[in-house]
Amino acid sequence: MNYNKLKKFWLAEQEIAHIHGWDFSHIDGRWDCREDDLPWDYPEIIKEYLSSDKRILDIDTGGGEFLLTLGHPYNMTSATEAYPPNVKLCKNTLVPLGINFREAVDYANLPFEDDSFDIVINRHGAYDISELKRILKKGGVFITQQVGEENDRELVELLCPNTAPKFKGWNLQNQISGFEQHGFDILKRDEHFCPIEFYDVGALVWFARIIEWEFIGFSVEKNFEQLCNAYNLIQTHGKAEGHIHRFMITAQKI
């Protein structure tokens, strides 16, 4: 096998590893992430609590793609985002609709008044429990689906051996304890692991560069030996596989 020829292809994938919002269509058909196999339905949980007269905030909205699928009245909808490319995207897509969008990088100091929201949602983003308590109305709910500390660990070990989890302790048990210590009532909770598979190394290179906070310091040059090992693994077994780690919480301010 001509690994140098493969390296040129992998370098090309590394070069184009950019993302708008949360769009993974570049690697469609080259990977499978079975997040649809989760035992809960995050949108349906939100809809259980959502009605047109309630004010909702989406923290770390990405490009607002998921938020818009809820079909909530725009004048009752707010969103925040911290990642600069997504901030620009939100200003171009959400603001013209009348959604109250704010750039927010400090999760402990969000740009909203006390008791502002009936519902706060957060899918795969950061949050501060004390700040959630401040901005939620009494009886308001926080609904989150989170990426746990063990996410993609097998794949990280494959490409970046001995890399410690960046978000150690980020799991259901620890987060439940935090909410309870802040006086929240836990309405729903669950945690699950699902398979994730890659069928070519180029897709894995692109993914690792996008999810840079997990694959810390990864590059084709630095991790070329590991990429060759991954190539041989896929040639032998048809895939490189790991698991995604997800948990969900619905917590009510009392």
Image: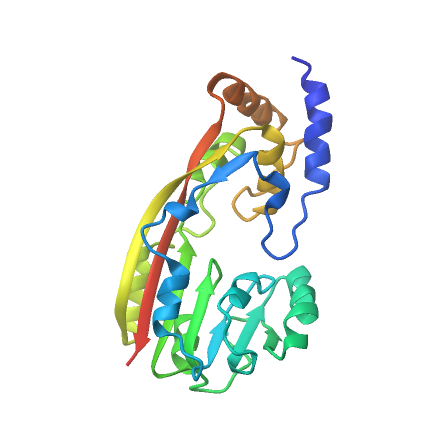
In the displayed structure, does residue 172 sit left or right of residue 91? left
In the displayed structure, does residue 52 sit left or right of residue 159? left
From what the image shows, is residue 22 above or below residue 118? above
In the displayed structure, does residue 189 sit left or right of residue 81? left
Q: Is residue 105 visible?
A: no
Residue at point 48% right, 68% down? 70
Residue 43 picture location, percent across and down: 41, 62
Residue 95 picture location, percent across and down: 65, 75
Give the quarter of the figure containing the C terminus: bottom left
Q: Quadrant of residue 51?
A: bottom left
Residue at point 37% right, 63% down? 44
Residue 20 picture location, percent across and down: 66, 55
Residue 248 picture location, percent across and down: 35, 59
From what the image shows, is residue 123 above or below residue 115? above
Decide which of 228, 199 is in the foreground and name it: 199
Residue at point 68% right, 64% down? 89
Q: Is residue 141 visible?
A: yes
- Colour basis: rainbow
Give the quarter of the figure containing the N terminus: top right
Q: Quadrant of residue 29?
A: top right
Decide which of 30, 162 is in the foreground and name it: 30
In the displayed structure, does residue 218 sit left or right of residue 240? right
- Residue sitting at the far top: 1
Residue at point 33% right, 63% down? 249
Q: Quadrant of residue 194?
A: top left
